[in-house]
Image (cartoon, rainbow, N blue to C red):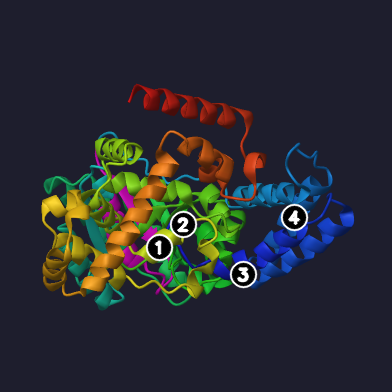
Amino acid sequence: MGSAYVFESLSKSLEKVFERMRGKPRLTEENVQEALREVRLALLEADVSYKVVRDFLGKVTERALGAELIKSVTPGQQFVKIVHDELEALMGEGDSTIPYRKEGLTVLMLVGLQGSGKTTTCAKLAMLVRQQKHRPMLVAADVQRPAAIDQLETLGRQLDVPVHLERGGIPPLICKQAVAKAGELNCDVVILDTAGRLHIDLQMMNELKDIVRMVKPDQTFLVCDAMTGQDAVNSAGEFNQQLPVDGVILTKLDGDARGGAALSIRSVTGKPIKFIGIGEKLDKLEPFHPDRMATRILGMGDVVSLVEKAQDVMAEEEAEELERKLRTERFDLEDFLKQIQALRRMGPLKDIMGMLPFFGNRMSEIEIDESGIDRVEAIICSMTRLERSQPEIIDSSRRQRIAQGSGTDPQDINRLLKQFKQMRKLLFRMTGPKGEEMLEAMTGGMQQQQEIGPGVGRAMMDPRRRKLAREKRKKSKRRRHRH
C-alpha cells in the first residue's frame, strides 16, 4: 500500500506507547490502562470517531487483561499483537473484488460529495477494470458541473476509453442511454460519474435514487475524501442510509490526512473499504488490505505490498537468474543497472521506502535525492558491456571516458566502483552458503518479517504459517545444494 504519510503521526504516537510497554516484565491492569489512555489520545488526535475509539479500547482491554502469554514473547510484544488484531478487525475484512456479470453489462455507480475526487476515481477505476481484462465505458452524469464533464472527457482520451456524455441532459436518462449504447461499442462495464454537492441535500439524493431505479447498478461505491476526517464518516453514514451502498473508496490517502476516516468508516457504515486512492496519477488506485494497513499503522512497514510491486516489474525467471548470480558472486554492473531500472518502475523511492519497517512512520523526516540514482545510471550506461561485466579493467583512461560520457567526475566513477564492490561482497555473504542462517539469526525468519515486521516475531505467526515457512526454507536449501 502506497499511503506513505497518512498515518505517520498516529504511528509515532503508538510507537512511543509500545516502546514503554516493551520494558514491562508483565501485563498488569495498571500498565495496560496507562498505555490505553495514550492509545485513546492518539486515536482521537487522528480524528477517529469517539464511539469507535471507545469500542476499540474496550476490546483491547478485555484481551490484554485476559491474555495468556505466548512463551518467547514479551508482554509488550503481546500487547502490540492485540492492538494489531483489533485494528485489523476494526477496518473489516478486505474485499476489493468487483462482481462482474458473466454475461451482459456490469454497471458500477460512484456517488459522493463534491470535491471528494469522484471524477478522477471513475477514470482510475476504468484503468483498473481494463487491467482485469474488461472493456469499460465512462458516463458523465454530473450535469451540474460542466467542468466535471470536460474532465471526464479528457481522462477518457488519456485512457482511450469511450465516454458517454450529453450536456444539459437529465442524469437518469443519460445513464439509461449509456447502458443501451455500451453494448454497441462492445463495452462490458459501465462506470457512472454522478453529481455531488457540498453537502447532502434532497435534490441530489432524489436524482441518485432515480438513477438506481432506472439503471439498477450492480455495485454502488461511495467515494470519500480521507482528508475531511469525521466529515467523511458522517456523510458516509447519511449516504448509506439512503442508498444501496456496496463499498467505500477512500481518496487522498497520500496527503496529510490524519487517517481517522479509514479507521472509522467500516464501523459506522458496516460497508467494506474497497479501494484507496494514493496519488493523482491514474494508476494510483489500490485494493484496500486491512491487515497491511494495520501493520503500517504500527510502524512495521508493508513488505507484502512491496514484494507484489517487485513481482509486477520482474519476471520470475529474472528473479531466479538474479538469485543464482548473487549466490555465485557473478552479480555485475549490468545486473545492478537492471535492478536500478526495475526499482524505478516500482515507483518513487520515497513510496518504496515507506513500505519498509522503521521507515514508514519517519518518511516526512527523510529527504531522498533521486538525482544520485540518475548519476549512477548515467555512469553505468556510459560503460561498455565488457566494463560492466569486468569493472576491474576500468583504468584511468577508461574512467576519464566514462566520466565525460556521463557528465560526472572520475572521482564519482571511483566512488561507485568501490561501493559496488562492497555491496557485492555483502550480498554474497547474505545469499551464499552461510547467508540463510545469518539472515535467520538477524531477522528471526524472513517469513515473519514479511508477515508482521520487526519487534513482534512469532507472536503473530500461527503454527500453520511457521510450518509453511520451515518448508519453504528447506526447499530453498535443497535447491541451493543442487546448484
Which label sits in the foreground, 4 or 1? Answer: 4
Quadrant housing the C terminus = top left
* The label number, if any, that marks residue 355 in the structure image: 2
The Cα–Cα distance between marks 4 and 3, rounded to whole angstroms, is: 23 Å
Q: Are marks 4 and 1 in contact (CB under 8 Å)?
A: no
Q: What residue type is labelled 1?
A: Asp
Looking at marks 4 and 3 on the same chain, the residue that comes earlier in the sequence is marked by: 4
Q: Do the residues labelled 4 and 3 touch (CB within 8 Å)?
A: no
Which label sits in the foreground, 1 or 3? Answer: 1
- Residue at 43% x, 61% y is 353
- Expressed as whole percent of the image width and height from the top left, the position of residue 439 reads 51, 42
State the residue in front, 222 or 358: 358
Asked if residue 89 is positioned above or below residue 405 in the image, the reply reads: above
Mark 1 — residue? 351
* The label number, if any, that marks residue 22 in the structure image: 4
- Residue at 73% x, 50% y is 79
Q: What element carries label 1?
A: helix
Q: Which amino acid does label 2 sit on?
A: Met
Q: Please provide the residue range marked out in magenta.
A: 104-128
The Cα–Cα distance between marks 3 and 2, rounded to whole angstroms, is: 20 Å
Looking at marks 2 and 4 on the same chain, the residue that comes earlier in the sequence is marked by: 4
Report whether residue 99 is seen: yes
Looking at marks 3 and 2 on the same chain, the residue that comes earlier in the sequence is marked by: 3
Q: Which amino acid does label 4 sit on?
A: Arg
Looking at the image, residue 51 sits to the left or right of residue 394; the answer is right
Looking at the image, residue 202 sits to the left or right of residue 315; the answer is right
